[in-house]
Image: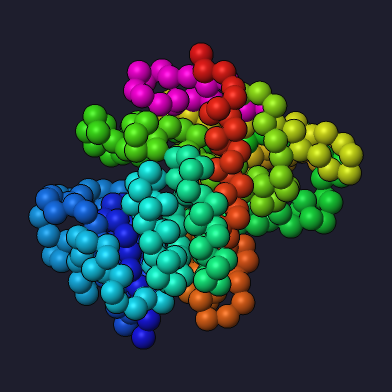
Amino acid sequence: MKNFLICGAGNIAQRHFRNLKTLLPDCVIDIYCSKREQYRIFDNNLNITLSNNLLDFYAINEIYHDLDEALLNKYDATFVCSLPPERMDIAIEIAKRGFNLFIEKPLSNNLAQIYRLQDKVEENNLKCAIGFQMRFHPLLNKLKEMVDSNEFGNIYRIEAYHCNSIYNWTNGRDLKDFYALKEKNGGGVLLSQIHEIDYLTWIFGNFYPLSAIYGNRLRAEVEDFITILSNLEIDGDCIPIIINLDFLSKVPTRKITIHGTEKIETFDLMDRSVVWNDLFLAEMKASIKSLDGEWQHPLAKLEDGISSLEYVMDIKNNFTKI
């Protein structure tokens, strides 16, 4: 029987709880969260019910409001699903105690303690996965196979889009205090939609931002749209990668187009045949298997999370806001 600790009680923490119980019905799960008042209860479609007690909805073994108290127990793995600015402090404490980690994306909203965590994970020989479930999308796996087998010939342009009004995926929530629109909470479209940075790196290798223009149309505290031009080098050739992200588009778009000398093909990542929670289930299955043996690819590692965050912070620190 496996024992887990989930840090956080929001949407993604609850999704991981449900998926762990689906895959390992007998596992024991504790929750650590600082919140003591009313909770939002989410389902897989992001519908919300308000409740004063998580125990009314989930078979939680124990709820802790003090991390040190929770870490007196022994866990096979811990899941860090708190707000981005809180993740490093929590993850470092967990790594000090010698517990394996699964950290939600993005790792943080800055680089301040990232390398300290990396040192602790390496020092204690821990496994640390990052929550990039898009790596388990069947169309992206198909694309990676096509790229690896050179089906596109010489690739000369890559375009990726993730454009979706924030009102489409918040189901009528009051956005006044919504984390994705708050600078202090690690919000903004770059960090929220960092998946695109990760899956492009996973498929094509490292690439580097050349220019970026971003701004704010919702008049919140953070950027809500951005266009990035990056450079990918393959065999000495420079290949432009154009990434468009926003919280604005009423018609959701999530796709990637590859332009090659042999073919041009677009992959619709919102294809209705793909069940969204299946990506999370596949990711969780790989995480569990990795605890007991060899690392299960394409599960993202800590260095993948660091790489994507370094890319985002490069843009935030060096490019143009309009």
Q: Residue at x 24, y 37 (%)?
A: 173
Magenta residues, as a range?
213-229
**In this rendering, would 112 be left or right of 186?**
right
Colour option used: rainbow
From this view, report whether residue 124 is shown above or below residue 133.
below
**In this rendering, would 278 be left or right of 264?**
left
**In this rendering, would 277 be left or right of 179?**
right
Q: Please give the count of numbered marks on the rendered protein.
A: 0
Could you tell me residue 281's position as x and y percent? Answer: 45, 65
The one of 85 and 247 positioned closer to us in this rendering: 85
From this view, report whether residue 91 is shown above or below residue 216.
below
Q: Residue at x 58, y 29 (%)?
A: 315
**Rendered-image quadrant of the N terminus:** bottom left
Q: Residue at x 37, y 76 (%)?
A: 75
Check if residue 82 falls in the magenta segment. no
Quadrant hosting residue 257: top right
Could you tell me residue 273's position as x and y percent? Answer: 51, 54
Observer able to see residue 133: no
Quadrant hosting residue 319: top right
Could you tell me residue 183's position as x and y percent? Answer: 37, 31
**In this rendering, would 293 be left or right of 224?**
right
Extreme-right residue of the structure: 236
The one of 119 and 185 positioned closer to us in this rendering: 119
Check if residue 227 falls in the magenta segment. yes
Could you tell me residue 253's position as x and y percent? Answer: 52, 35
